[in-house]
Image (spheres, coloured by chain):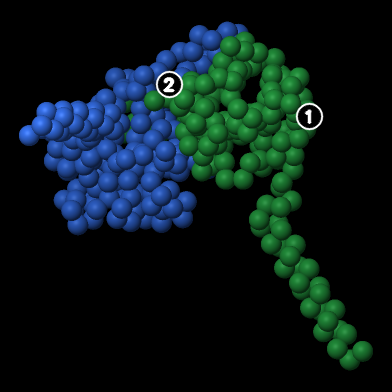
Chain colours: A green, B blue
């Protein structure tokens, strides 16, 4: 029993290290979004660009649409509907006037991306999400999924784009 | 000499095929930009996103900044100056109100990317471009480089961003 305290210490220390690693790697942030059960796809910030946009009004953001490889291939080939496995990410940032850019231009004309507002995903799975046009929807703020209420309007709002497989964004050349 | 006409035909046909392939692959569009001698970097449309912006005034565009691997690594590590081999691409599209998006929102608030205006590149080579802060500048419209005059203002305009290695854009999280 002489070595027991050391063993106990080693187990406690190891548990601490594992918990720290799990936390640092975002393991505990890996929460699924309600209704559609979508998690943040790993590496989405590295995906290729589909297009950009600006929304005024309450949203007041600058946004970028990124696509995984399946999405980009489909966009470039112009084939509809998007195949299963397509994921489209919509990143958005607050719409901020750039004082330093405006100084260079000599007038107030430049708006840049401020802090991130939220991130949305559309995930194509024609069987799993058959009731919503084959698409699952998710929205995350600071890595945390937004509640049900935020997702209930996704499909009804996307329905007018039915002839384009419910995707509003056009690929920017 | 009996086979000669066939050989001639084969050579002419092959030449035609090669010319067609060269044209289709954009070989003849591969013109270098003046002053800094920069060509369009192959595959830049696949690069990862640095940030997005909107310019009003004469530019009236939506823009995306993409970076090659060297650029993205430097942006994410927040290290300055950017290392040699960095290339930053600035894509821009006309700023177009989206009637179909506005219908869904029930008001005029949505602006999307229209047709491409031009593409600019900043290429870091601290020796080759020592006279302009280590950066070479280029601008292309429909794959063709813009003339000298368009490039003479690049460096003077970027000089106010000297403390950030002449790059205005901040990486968007």
Judging from the image, mark 2 belongs to the subunit labelled B
Q: Which residue is mark 1?
A: A35
- Residue at image x 50%, y 32%? A72
Report the Cα–Cα distance between label 2 and label 1.
32 Å
Q: Which residue is mark 2?
A: B113
- Residue at image x 74%, y 26%? A127
Give the crowd class for mark 2: few <14, some 14-19, many >=20 residues within 10 Å.
Answer: many
Name, please, the residue furthest toward the right. Answer: A1
Estimate the x, y position of residue B132 in percent, counting from the top left: 19, 48
Compare residues A24 and B108 and report the one nearer the observer: A24
Secondary element under disc 1, as helix, strand or loop, is loop
Compare residues B68 and A112 and report the one nearer the observer: B68
User: Which mark is on residue B37?
Assistant: none
Quarter holding residue B122: top left
Say whether mark 1 and mark 2 are on the same chain.
no
Q: Are marks 2 and 1 in contact (CB under 8 Å)?
A: no
Residue A57 appears in the rendering: no
Q: Is residue A63 left or right of residue B83?
A: right
Q: Is residue A123 left or right of residue A168?
A: right
Quarter of the image that includes the N terminus of chain B:
top left
Compare residues A78 and A4 and report the one nearer the observer: A78
- Residue at image x 70%, y 57%? A23
Estimate the x, y position of residue A16 in percent, counting from the top left: 76, 68
Quarter holding residue A148: top right
Estimate the x, y position of residue B112 in percent, counting from the top left: 46, 19
* Count of residue discs: 2
């Amino acid at each position: 029993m002489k070595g027991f305290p050391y063993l106990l210490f080693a187990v406690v220390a190891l548990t601490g290290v594992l918990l720290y690693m799990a936390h640092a790697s975002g393991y505990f942030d890996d929460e699924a979004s309600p209704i559609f059960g979508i998690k943040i796809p790993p590496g989405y910030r590295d995906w290729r660009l589909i297009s950009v946009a600006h929304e005024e009004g309450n949203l007041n953001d600058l946004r970028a649409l990124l696509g995984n490889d399946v999405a980009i291939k489909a966009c470039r080939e112009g084939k509809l509907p998007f195949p299963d496995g397509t994921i489209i990410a919509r990143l958005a940032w607050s719409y901020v006037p750039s004082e330093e850019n405006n100084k260079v231009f000599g007038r107030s004309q430049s708006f840049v991306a401020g802090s991130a507002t939220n991130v949305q995903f559309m995930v194509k799975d024609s069987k799993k999400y058959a009731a919503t046009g084959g698409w699952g929807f998710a929205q995350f703020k600071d890595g945390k999924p937004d509640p049900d209420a935020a997702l209930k309007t996704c499909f009804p709002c996307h329905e007018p784009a039915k002839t384009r497989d419910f995707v509003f964004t056009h690929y920017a050349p």
